[in-house]
Image: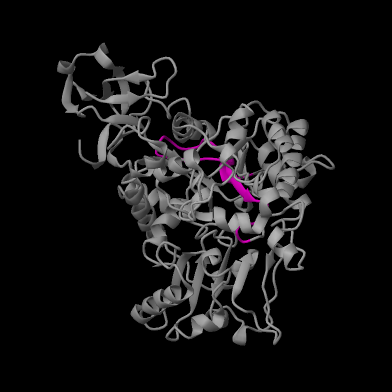
Amino acid sequence: MLFDALYTNGTFYTQDARRPRARSVGVHNGRIISLDDELPATYFRDVHKLGGAAVVPGFNDAHCHLSYVGQALVQADLRPAVCATMDALLAAVDAACAAAPDGAWVQGAGYDQNYLGNLHPTAEQLDAVSHGHPVWLMHNSRHMGVANTAAFERAGYPGRLNVTAPDGGAVPVAPDGRAVGLLQETARALVMDAIPAPTVADIAAMVGAGSAALLKLGVTSITEPGLGAPAHIGHTLSDLAGYQAARDAGLLGVRATVMPYLTTLHSLDADPGDVAEGAVPRLGLDLGMRTGFGDEWLRLGPAKILSDGSLIGRSAFMCCDYDVDAAAGHSNRGLLQFATEDLRRRIIGAHRAGWQVATHAIGDAALDVVMDIFEEAHRLHPRPDTRHRIEHLSVASDEQIRRVASLGLVPVPQGRFIYELGDGVARAMGPERTRISYRVKALLDAGLEIPASTDAPVVEADPILNIHDLVNRRTSSGADFVPEERITVAQALRSYTVGSAYAAREDHYKGSLSRGMLADFVALSEDIYEVPADTIRNVRVTATVVGGRLAHGAL
């Protein structure tokens, strides 16, 4: 019997401190069985020579909306790189509406008002280019969007009148009482609930398209944060079925850890009387399924919940007013998406039921609220090594970072935010508070193991660009953004591999190129450890191997 394949004549950066480099990797049944000369080439059915290429473990995006990456490929692309002005955005919507079937919804995604003169498109502007279609445009943060008049009418609000914001949301209204078009946070559901939900087959197609796009970038694993709660995040109640259908059809090309949104969990206590007075009931899914259920291709990860909004949308919950709003004479500290007691009940209930919990907390005030809840959860119901997560952790003081470390929490930052969103954040925050925004080195200095992620399609999914920005920390305008928070290539690569596996509780079989680990790795056009820092962005993925098999490129 021969083993499957030997990949040789490469420079493998293994991310294993016991053996940091290797020249060859042997693979059988999707796992690494040998390094270097531990087994001769004659023991393998196939031998692939890599021509000296630098090889790293497959990139693992710890916070990536894979299904939305796929969905964005079939919607109007409104990202700043494509639509740099309001006129360009409206022209793109015009073209999409002109090509759409009669009566169909037209959707677009990726716009950022910080590139549009700090203005969101209005319903009236969209009406002028809609050709009679209902139009919904999702902001790149995915925390807000803009609808036209026809969309409001489909949702039951003719003339955009009498539109009332739900708790945790906002609906700006003109002096004549009409909604101007922007819907923030939970108010998005007012229109989104009227958009026909995708089918299981639709979601499977999105997952497949997203997988194909990410494999080209060297991404072999992702964690999708939030499924099954379309009023908050997710497409339909059947999102997980869409993932399963994608896998059954051979469309799921990357390993996926999926987070059900926390509102999809329900009480596991059969009789309310079983819950002690003052206690929080356990929250979970039917049959007691929780974090870890599944296999190496598709598994349940943490339960996800949003505590606050977005930084560039100025809805993240802050300790003090946003600088740009204060300068305009307005008071705005953002908002919590849930009342504190509701957030507490949901997080502690999931913790009690054995879930890992991932809480989106961007603002520093939200971070304090969430840390208080996690601390109480551990005090009331101690559990070892929970690895509860703080998604984004975009604004944090030194004292807050020390507390994150003391509580054993895992922060999940996004380096690419620095380039694509940094200029807008600096305007919103002001120079004093920008210094505690998008911190990374401070997290490592505190002894934290951190993952790497992009939050795609909020920003580009390309890991090479993400690493470039973690190392260089410059915005799209070329401005330095808190340069003291720069990290090294080695630190960034560890975050993208070992760190992301740790954050998903998968580091026992994923993240490094060691015997027994998954044979997921990426060959690069240049040695990313050796190129000048300001040229990292030019490195390209030439081959992506998943489970020992070539999934993209050539060897």
Q: In which quarter of the image is the C terminus?
A: top left
Q: Position of residue 547 (x, y in %)?
A: 31, 33
Residue 310 appears in view: no
Give coordinates of residue 58: x percent, y percent. Answer: 37, 35
> Which residue is painted at 63% across and 31% down in the image?
386
Q: Give the range drawn in magenta.
A: 284-313
104 lies left or right of 365: left
In-front residue for pair 508/329: 329
> Between residues 548 and 398, which one lies in front from this camera angle?
398
Query: Does 159 sit above or below residue 328?
Result: below
Q: Is 19 positioned to the left or the right of 388 in the image?
A: left
Instruction: Examine the rendering and report whether any part of residue 406 can be seen.
Output: yes
Q: Tell me where residue 169 appears, x and y as whole percent.
A: 68, 65
Q: Residue at 67% x, 51% y: name it.
A: 431
Q: Which is the main secondary structure of the residues drawn in magenta?
A: loop
Q: In this view, does 511 lie above or below 175?
A: above
Q: Does the magenta stretch include residue 223?
A: no
Q: How many marks?
A: 0
| Identity of the residue drawn at 42% across and 68% down | 83
Q: Which colour scheme is used?
A: one colour
Determine whether 184 is above or below 431 in the image: below
Q: In which quarter of the image is residue 179?
A: bottom right
Q: Which residue is drawn at 55% across and 58% down?
A: 141
Instruction: Answer with left or right where residue 375 lies relative to residue 486.
Output: right
Pick the residue in front: 88 or 300. Answer: 88
In the picture as drawn, the residue positioned furthest to the front comes out as: 479
Q: Residue reaching furthest top?
A: 38
Image coords of residue 323 (percent x, y): 71, 58
Quarter of the N terminus within the rendering: top left
